[in-house]
Structure formats: C-alpha cells, structure tokens
Amino acid sequence: MANIIEVTDLSYHYPQMEQRPALQHVNFTVQAGEWLAIIGHNGSGKSTLAKSLDGLLTPDPQNKGEIKVAGLTLTDETVWQIRAKIGMVFQNPDNQFVGATVEDDVAFGLENRGVPRPEMQERVHAALKRVRMTEFADREPARLSGGQKQRVAIAGIIAQRPDIIILDESTSMLDPKGRAEVLATVRQLNQEDHLTVISITHDIDEAAQANRIVVLDDGQVKETGTPAEIFAYGERLIEMGLDVPYAERLKTALRQVGADVPKQYLTEEGMADWLWTSHSKM
Amino acid sequence: MDITFKDVAFTYQAGSPFASDALTDINLTIHDQAFTAIIGHTGSGKSTLVQHLNALLKPSAGTVTIGERVITPETDNKNLKPIRQKVGMVFQFPENQLFEETVAKDIAFGPMNFGVSEADALQRATEMVQLVGLDTQYLERSPFDLSGGQMRRVAIAGVLAMKPEVLILDEPTAGLDPVGRREILGMVERLHREQHLTVVLITHLMEDVAAYADQVVVMDRGQVAKTGTPQAVFQDVAWLQSHQLGVPETALFAEKLKQRGFQFEQLPLTEAALAAALAPQLPLTKRGATDE
Amino acid sequence: MNKLIFGRYIPGDSFIHRLDPRGKLLLSFYFIGIIFLAHNWQSYLLLFLFTMFAVLMSRVNLGFFIRGVRPLIWLILFTVILQIFFTRGGHLYWHWGPLVVSQYGLVNGGYIFMRFVLIIFMSTLLTLTTPPLQLSDAIESILKPFKVFHLPVYEIALMISIALRFVPTLMDETEKIMNAQRARGVDFGSGSLSQKMRAIIPLLIPLFVNSFNRAEDLATAMEARGYQGGEGRTKYRVLTWKGQDTLAVAAFAVITGLLIWLR
Ligand SMILES: Nc1ncnc2c1ncn2[C@@H]1O[C@H](COP(=O)(O)OP(=O)(O)O)[C@@H](O)[C@H]1O
Ligand SMILES: Nc1ncnc2c1ncn2[C@@H]1O[C@H](COP(=O)(O)OP(=O)(O)O)[C@@H](O)[C@H]1O
Ligand SMILES: [Mg+2]
Ligand SMILES: [Mg+2]
C-alpha cells in the first residue's frame, strides 16, 4: 500500500528549551489505512511529533527535516491543505470543545472551511450518528462525560472527512467505559472507512489494536515493530511508557514459581493454550 | 480512627429546582489503619462519598462519625479544621491546586494553616519531598516547571505534610503513564505499611485493588452495592460484569482457565496468586524459584 | 455547582422562548425607552398589564422575576425615598427642614418604583427565556453593519460564545480548587478582610494558571480544526425571523400608540 505519511530526518527544538531537542532525526512512514501506535515515556516527544505532522509548531530554523502528507510536502503554503487531511483529538476533553453545544462543536471545523449551511447540517448529523451521539446534539459540554466529549471531538473530525486521524493520549483521562467507547469508535473508522489512525497511547489495549508500533525515546525512534514484537519486551515495556500485557505479567510470576515459560510473546489465548498443553503433559 | 456512616444521604443543591440526589442510604465503616478501595463507575457517588470523610460535605440526612466527632446535617462550619488535619485528601488531578513560588513553600502551606511554624513546616517539606520520591533539589524550583507526574507528587507531599492519620486519594493515577502510576501506588502502599496510615483509594484499576486493598466498597448509583474483602467482592465475576464494573485481569484469565479444566479453590486475583495456584498443576523445572 | 442557573436561562418552549433573540434583545431596549412615555397611572397600569401578560406567557415561575428584583431592592428604595422626600407639589403631608412628603412626591415615588420593577421584569424575561448563546448570536447579527468600520464582529461573537461555553467549566474548577485548599486548612470567607484576601490567592493563582493552559490547548485545537479568523467562514447557527416575531413587534407598536394616546 502507498505511504500516506513520510517523515524524513525530522528534528525539532523548542526555542524556550535550552538542552536537547524534543525530536532528533526522526524517520518513519505510515501506510494508508494503517493503524500506527506511538509509545514512549512522558516527555519522549510524542506530542511534539503529532503537532509537527499537523504543522502546529512554530518552525524550527535549524530544522532540515521533511514531512510529506498524502504527497504534499508540509510548508507554509500547504499547511491548511494538510490540516484538512488530518484530524486531531487531544488529551483533555474539555480543552478542545469549542462549540457551545454538541452540534455547534461538530460544525466548527466546517464553518472554518466555509462549507455551505445545508451541506453542513447534513454532515453534522451524519457524523453525530456515526459516533452515536445524535440524541445529545443540543447538549452543552458541561453535561457530557469525558468519553462523550471525546466522541464529539471525533465527530467533528469525521464531518471534515480527513484521511488521517491522530489521537494524542485521547483516552488517558477517561474512565474504562469512556475509553472502551472511544476505542470502539476509532476501530470502526479504521476498519469501515479505512481512515489511517495514529494513536499515541500508554494503554496496552489501545496499542494492541495497532498494525505497527513506533517506540520513541528522548526524541528518537528507538524501535518499530508489530505489537507482538514490541510486547515481547515484557517488563521493559514500562520504561517505554506502556503497560505490560497480562500474559507477560503472568509469565514473570510463573517464572518465579519455577515454570519454564516460552520466551516469545503470547496473547492471552495463546498463554491459556500453552498452560493447558503443559498441564496435560503432567 | 474509624469513620462510620449511618443512614447517610446527600443531595446537591438541596431545595433548589436543580436538586440531585448523589448518595442514599449509606451505611459503612472505614476501619482504622485499613486500606479501603472504593470502586464504581463515573457518577456513582465515589467523590461525593469521600468528601464526607473530612467534612467538606455534610450529610443531608444521617450522621458521619469521624473519630470522636459526629457530623450531622446541623453541624456548623466552624471548628472543622482539626478534622481536615487528621483526614488528608488528595483530589483528582491535585496538581491543579499548586500555587506557591517554590515546591517547598507549597508543601509547607498545609501545615502552616494548621499552626505549624514556618521553620517546622519547611522541615516537613524536605522530608515529604523525599517521601514522594523526589530529590531535595526540587524544593527551590517552581512547581509549574515540573512535569505532570512530578507536580502530582508535590501535591501529594503537600497533603502528607499535614501528617494526617487518614489519607484519601481520589483517582490519584488518572492520566499518568505506567511509570507514574507504579510510583504513586508504590508510595501509597509504603505509607500504609510503614507509617500505618489509614488509606482510602478511589480507583478504576482493579489490579491495584486486588493487590493492595483490605476492604472494597462498590458504589452504584449513589448506594453501596457491595462491601467486603477483594477476595469476596471479586469472586462473583458475572455480577461485576453485569454492573459494568472492571474485574482484575487475573480473575478473568482464571475464569478462562477454569473453562479449559483447571481447578482453583478460590478465584486468584493477582498474577502471583495465580502462579502459586498453577504451580502444582504444571511441570516445573528443577531450577525452582530463581528469577532470571 | 449551579451551572444550570447561569445566565438564569430557564429552558422552555413558550411563545416567548421561541421568539427571535434579535427581536427580543431590541424590543427589551425599546421597552426601556417607551417606559419614559408613561406619566399617569393609566399608562403605568397598561405597561404593568402588558409586562405581566408577557411574563405569564413565558410560563416561567413568577418567583424567578421577584428574585431578580431582590438584589437591587436597596437601590430602588433609596431612589424612591429620595424622590418622595425632595419632590414638592400638591397636598403637603409632612415637612422637616428641606425634607417634605407631598402628594406629587408620593405619586412620583410610586411611578419610579413601577419603572424599576417593569424594567427588571422585562430584562429578566429576556435572560430567563433566551440562552446566552442566542444572545451572543443576536449581538453578532445586530453588530454586523459595523463590519464596514472594520469591527471584527465574527471574532467578537466567537469570543463571547467561547467565554460562555467555559463559564460552567470555570465554575466547576473554582469549586474543586476551593475544596482542595479547604482540605489543606484554608478557611474561605472567615476572618478579617485581609485574611479573606489572603485566602483567595491559593484559589486565584491555580485558576489563572489552569485557564492559561486551557487557552493554549484550545488555540491549538482550533488551529488544528482549520480556524484562520472570521474571513470566509460560514455559520451553522442562523437566526430566522418569523411571523411571530413580527407579531411581537406589532404588539409593541400598539402599546406605544396607546401610551401616546394616554398622555
Ligand atoms: N511548549 C513547549 N515549550 C518548551 N518545551 C516543551 C514544550 N512542549 C514540550 N516541551 C518539551 O519537549 C519534550 C517533549 O515533549 P512532548 O512532545 O510533550 O512529550 P510527550 O508527549 O511524549 O510526553 C519534553 O522535554 C518537554 O518538556
Ligand atoms: N458539585 C456538584 N453539583 C451537582 N451535582 C454534582 C456535583 N458533583 C457531583 N454531582 C453529581 O453527583 C453524582 C455523583 O457524582 P460523583 O460523586 O462525582 O461520582 P464519581 O466520583 O463516582 O464519579 C453525579 O450524578 C454527579 O453528576
Ligand atoms: Mg504528550
Ligand atoms: Mg469522582
């Protein structure tokens, strides 16, 4: 499949920051329709990377890197075109809710792009339906849960019909129910509408959804691999800013009681199979 | 110091057209020196419940007995300070309460409000900042220059500096990365074990409940749906799931293993417990309990 | 928090609720103007009946209107008493130095009182039946002609609507921070004035810092969603003038006519 995002030798240095740059020589690509997870400890540069892709940072004069989104190279001229192709959902549900009500918020991006009103209404309703928030259309944000607000944010993105959705720790402030709802919505967009998903996360269930995982550490890409490859790091995942998958935690505990557990990554299902096979051998 | 709820109800904005019942019919005891976990989904009344533990909210009906003090709907707002000192409360996203120029001053703020001298309060700040796992070099930094996780630890230090007997934490790990979560929970567990603090923890992380709590309180629509040891509460996986409550992953996994034919006397809740229960049912290598 | 009472808008579906906010806003101002046409008890009675009719039509509890008068009651009484004690004319009931109680004074005092009550009732009716957001839409629409003078009408309206949207959030946050500081031993609202002032610092600083961070996040989110200023934007929310709005204007015209006739 074609690459929808190509990042070549990207570095970024916050003007206020004296010491090391927030991003250093980052290279990676994202394929159209792919779900890519980005993990890394706090301060490793994940948000900086996400904002760079959308042209949301003041350009760094020392930076020579290049970002290409859907064939367009990111410059001052193309930035608005590129923003139209990317939808971003941020961490704090409250701080990205612009409209006074749910439907106003969904319409905000369309208003900005000068979409005619009849079309706008159509798109807003369709988008709200997609995230199952239609009955909340005239609610104020103060009367929504965190998960609902994030789904409204996603509806605002759907309405703009972008190719890519970037979630920057969008589920981290939610309770388990809200997290599951948001994740289900994103999964649907990825599978049915073939939207490319980039999700920055500390959540193991969210990372497990991805086709590939990129590990950032101190502004550098440290590792890229499938979830199975990355999850095999076991306890070391903690330093990479990710929870340890359950099967890996159980393996550690089993080793401690003297069981000879396999080295490679096992899903929970795989772990249960392995346990049962070993048990039967007794 | 025990804290006891007797027939407690609470209504927000009572008497106005916007009145809403947040708690009904609460009977509950938080035992001295116990580690109590409060679970339940958002809006079930957990935060409202714990704000009664230090009399930030007074019951609309019933009584809350905090040590010697009895709080009723008629209790007036004076003289509640001694309770606030004995029952320390860490709110959700406590980093939002920092305001002083330096970390040291912010931590000293609480104790000084309770009449501790400035010198003693700053001394406590030095102790507490280390207790929450930060270097003393941070004392003279501005709290606003720290990372989110560090700010949160400073805020917790500010509550610990009041030397409370009871420590309440309202979702203290929300929004943190796994390292931050481990550090904070580890610290709470240490305080409970070493300093015998009574701990009340609101959380959605069932693994932590299973690993640390002595007592679990399950809230559901403003009522106490269940209380008991984690062992007792998590035994009934189907009931928890029907109430859309989380279950420790070990319990879920053990249920799966049961279906395949493994047997457990009682449902294990932590990986260590599961491993111990599985050990006799697996071929072990001779290497035994060595960690690699 | 009393987030739902803010702006004291009471949700409803009455005739008054459904009126175009532009009409409501302009007519409320117009009403203040025509009150000054009233100079006898007949015209005040007419205005009173008209106002009560509007109040009843809104189907909002009368208590809310009376509550609107309460905070201003001292100002009203003060003005009324001045009016009574310093107006001469007609029968003189009582006097002491420069102070008098005369027939005209009593009558004028009564009129002034009525004027206050009517204005408060009418403006309360506006805020009780119009969501703040619609008011901001109305202001935007009314200000539109001033665009020729380079008044950034779009931006002003967006600012008002964002400010309104964040009022409940800020109120929630204020309550949370107050509780957090109370738990650290702060006593809000007790002690001397200087103690009270000092207690407010641990509230204001976090509130300020959080709002600043919020504003920064919000600006980023808006930019990511393609916001480049008012130029070329379309509007999702539009106001439509309907027959009922013309009817309301006509009612005011009739009242104006009657007032002139009653003079
Ligand atoms: N606006 C900013 N000004 C200066 N430094 C910043 C800014 N935002 C982030 N940084 C710094 O850049 C580094 C990377 O931050 P960030 O991209 O936010 O990491 P992450 O999202 O992985 O936690 C950190 O060291 C952080 O302190
Ligand atoms: N300050 C408040 N004013 C009015 N209602 C509130 C307030 N705080 C909470 N509530 C309501 O009380 C109920 C319980 O909320 P809360 O105790 O915060 O639950 P939890 O902490 O379990 O999420 C909810 O329905 C919530 O909407
Ligand atoms: Mg980040
Ligand atoms: Mg809560």
Image (tube, coloured by chain):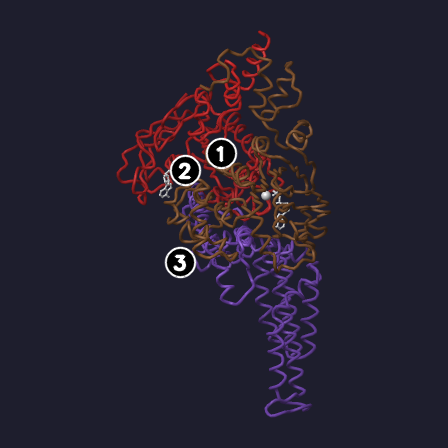
Chain colours: A red, B brown, C purple
Amino acid type at circle 2 is: Arg
Q: Which residue is nearer to you in this view: A115 or B247?
A: B247
Above or below, comparing residue C216 to residue A54 in the picture = below
As drawn, the label of residue C150 is: 3
Label 3 residue near ligand 1, CB within 8 Å? no
- Observer-nearest of B162 and B195: B195
- Residue that numbered label 2 is attached to: A83
Q: Can residue C154 be seen in this view?
A: no
Q: Is there a contact, CB below 8 Å, between mark 3 and mark 2?
A: no
Image x and y of residue B262, in percent: 63, 15
Quadrant of picture, ligand 4: top right
Q: Do labels 3 and 2 share a chain?
A: no
Both marks 3 and 1 on one chain = no
> Considering the numbered disc 3 on the image, is that residue within a helix, a strand or a loop?
loop
Q: Could you tell me how far apart the alpha carbons at marks 2 and 1 are, in whole angstroms? A: 37 Å
User: Which chain contains the residue that carries disc 3?
Assistant: C
Instruction: Establish if C71 lies above or below A17.
Output: below
Q: State the residue position of label 1.
A: B182
Q: Can residue A275 be seen in this view?
A: yes
* Disc ID at residue A84: none
Q: Are marks 2 and 1 in contact (CB under 8 Å)?
A: no
- State which quadrant residue A124 falls in: top right
- Screen quadrant of the C terminus of chain B: top left
